[in-house]
Amino acid sequence: MINADIESWALARAHHIVLNEGLSLAKAAQDLDRKRSRSLVYELRKVITAAIVEAHAASFDPQGVRPES
């Protein structure tokens, strides 16, 4: 995997995560909705973990990291 490829993928993936998960969490925190905030923190952890696992798996794949479908 070429370094530039993983950097581009990581930036795009982080952008996607922040837009989809982070903004929801910020809104729940702003509304002082603790139950929803906890739930969204769990989801955010899950998405970040999946991205790390995907990047790790791709490091062994000669095709490299592929965009999400």
Image (cartoon, rainbow, N blue to C red):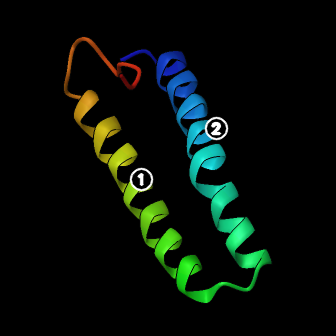
Q: Residue furthest top?
A: 63
**Looking at the picture, does residue 49 appear above or below residue 9?**
below
- Counting other residues with Cα less than 10 Å from the Cα at mark 1, is it few (<14), some (14-19), or many (20 or more)? some
Q: Nearer the viewer, residue 42 or 52?
A: 42
Q: Amino acid at mark 1?
A: Val
Under tag 2, what secondary structure?
A: helix
- Counting other residues with Cα less than 10 Å from the Cα at mark 2, is it few (<14), some (14-19), or many (20 or more)? few
Quadrant housing residue 58: top left
Q: Residue at x 73, y 86 (%)?
A: 32
In which quadrant is the C terminus drawn?
Answer: top left
Whether the residues at callouts 1 and 2 have beta carbons within 8 Å, the answer is no
Residue 43 on image: x %, y %: 43, 63
How far apart are labels 1 and 2 at the CA level? 12 Å
Q: Which labelled disc corresponds to residue 47?
A: 1
In which quadrant is the N terminus drawn?
Answer: top left
21 left or right of 31? Answer: left
Under tag 1, what secondary structure?
A: helix
**Looking at the picture, does residue 2 appear above or below residue 12?**
above
65 left or right of 24? Answer: left
Q: Residue furthest right?
A: 30
Q: Residue at x 36, y 55 (%)?
A: 49
Q: Amino acid at mark 2?
A: His
Residue 5 on image: x %, y %: 49, 17
Residue identified by numbered label 2:
15
Q: Residue at x 57, y 22 (%)?
A: 8
